[in-house]
Image: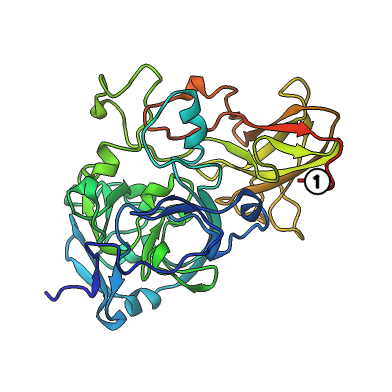
């Protein structure tokens, strides 16, 4: 069988251009996020401002006509699919937010040092992804809708990339999801070839990537090479020795990775994007705006804003599309996407602004980062706090 034209380079000499406003958190591999105000400026995140999360050099496609993805493993007959084959399947557009599990890691590290790329509050983005549903693709290898286990014993779907990751000793990034999720059309798992109506850019998985809505971004594998039906969860590094949620009592001297399952859904989250930490503002009315989201397709029932560090609260206005009222779990709203919020508070002196979201299952963000601290700094979903410095002589609002 001929080798696919998609390949992972061994160095960083062929990286794509990036937007100059991105905040670079690591150069090799390239990891960057937009400024807070840029992120919250629109419901759909522009491709150039969508966060970049990589574990190695960006793969190169030599010839699109020679590209294919192999579907195999514990199925009757493996198939090799070209991009044209996948495009012939029904196309779906799914608006979904991808969030890195390490979002807000820098804040957690201030409480107690953690390992990993430092992220502010912008390691996420909301896009409309276009492609074929994985449930339709799997029917091509005789795996019906709503299959929990194949005749050969397959219970998970593993996505395998072509990038070269140091953590995999130069091998490809890989991750898996349960077969029942992959074969459920309502789960909206895509093999995506478009982002915001355009062909995927290299940074975001060109020519084909997985989109797994409602779970941490680490499971939406880019630059797909193979999709295998397997008996157990993927044995890849990022499934077995990373992206697991440990209690504060576990550190690098006593960790046992096998005691925790790979993280999938993300908890309820919110962050203020209209203000930087330690912002100088003129006393008076200040706009507090940002995003809120939860995993598993759960909606946002409420976003509470405190103008005084948590002593008192007001409810923020929530919205997605400006011309459609946001109603949790309503069919007119995007169940996999974030919700933007806005409130106006009166600032008289130095204070701390707090955001706290509640999802449709009544899950609430925890108050303190100390209670959810973990050695890898993932899933920092504590109340988001912004310190404001009242400056009477300031000429304009920050």
Whether residue 154 is visible to the viewer of this picture, yes or no, is no
On the image, the x and y values in percent for residue 295 come to: 51, 41
- Near mark 1 (Cα within 10 A), the count class, few <14, some 14-19 or many ≥20, is some
Please tell me which residue is depicted at 39% across the width and 76% down the height of the picture: 87
On the image, the x and y values in percent for residue 297 come to: 54, 45
Picture layout, residue 205 above or below residue 257: below
Number of numbered tags placed on the structure image:
1
Residue labelled with disc 1: 397
On the image, the x and y values in percent for residue 251 come to: 32, 22
Picture layout, residue 113 above or below residue 274: above
Picture layout, residue 160 above or below residue 267: below
In this rendering, position of residue 385 left or right of residue 259? right
Please tell me which residue is depicted at 26% across the width and 46% down the height of the picture: 155
Outermost residue on the front side: it is: 393
In what element is the residue under mark 1?
loop
Q: Quadrant of residue 351?
A: top right
In this rendering, position of residue 397 left or right of residue 272? right
Outermost residue on the left side: it is: 1
> Viewer-proximal residue, 130 or 17?
17
Whether residue 79 is visible to the viewer of this picture, yes or no, is yes
Please tell me which residue is depicted at 43% across the width and 49% down the height of the picture: 217
Quadrant for the N terminus in the image: bottom left
> Viewer-proximal residue, 132 or 145?
132
In this rendering, position of residue 302 left or right of residue 104? right
Please tell me which residue is depicted at 40% across the width and 19% down the height of the picture: 248
On the image, the x and y values in percent for residue 40 come to: 65, 52
């Amino acid at each position: 069988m001929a080798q696919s034209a998609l390949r992972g380079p061994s160095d960083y000499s062929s990286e794509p251009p990036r937007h100059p406003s991105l905040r670079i958190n690591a150069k090799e591999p390239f990891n960057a996020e937009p400024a807070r105000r840029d992120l919250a400026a629109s419901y759909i995140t522009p491709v150039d401002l969508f966060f970049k999360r990589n574990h190695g050099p960006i793969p190169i496609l030599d010839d699109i006509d020679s590209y294919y993805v192999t579907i195999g493993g514990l199925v009757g007959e493996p198939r090799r699919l070209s991009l044209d084959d996948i495009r012939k399947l029904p196309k779906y557009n799914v608006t979904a937010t991808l969030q890195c599990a390490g979002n807000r890691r820098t804040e957690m590290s201030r409480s107690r040092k953690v390992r990993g790329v430092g992220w502010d509050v912008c390691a996420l983005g909301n896009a409309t992804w276009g492609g074929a549903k994985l449930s339709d693709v799997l029917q091509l290898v005789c795996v019906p809708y709503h299959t929990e286990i194949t005749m050969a014993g397959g219970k998970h779907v593993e996505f395998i990339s072509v990038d070269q990751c140091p953590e995999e000793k130069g091998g490809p990034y890989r991750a898996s999801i349960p077969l029942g999720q992959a074969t459920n059309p309502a789960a909206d798992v895509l093999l995506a070839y478009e982002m915001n109506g355009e062909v995927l850019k290299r940074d975001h998985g060109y020519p084909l990537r997985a989109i797994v809505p409602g779970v941490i971004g680490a499971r939406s594998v880019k630059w797909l090479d193979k999709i295998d039906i397997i008996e157990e969860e993927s044995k890849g590094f990022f499934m077995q020795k990373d992206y697991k949620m440990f209690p504060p009592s576990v550190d690098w001297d006593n960790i046992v990775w096998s005691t925790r399952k790979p993280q999938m859904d993300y908890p309820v989250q919110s962050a203020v994007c209209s203000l930087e930490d330690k912002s100088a503002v003129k006393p008076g009315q200040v706009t507090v705006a940002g995003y809120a989201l939860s995993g598993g397709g759960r909606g946002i029932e409420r976003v509470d804003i405190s103008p005084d560090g948590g002593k008192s609260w007001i409810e923020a206005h929530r919205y997605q599309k400006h011309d459609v009222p946001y109603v949790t779990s309503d069919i007119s709203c995007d169940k996999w996407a974030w919700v933007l919020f806005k409130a106006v508070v009166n600032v008289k002196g130095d204070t701390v602004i707090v955001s706290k979201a509640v999802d449709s299952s009544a899950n609430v963000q925890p108050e303190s980062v100390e209670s959810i601290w973990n050695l890898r700094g993932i899933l920092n979903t504590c109340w988001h706090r912004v310190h404001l410095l009242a400056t009477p002589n300031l000429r304009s609002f920050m």
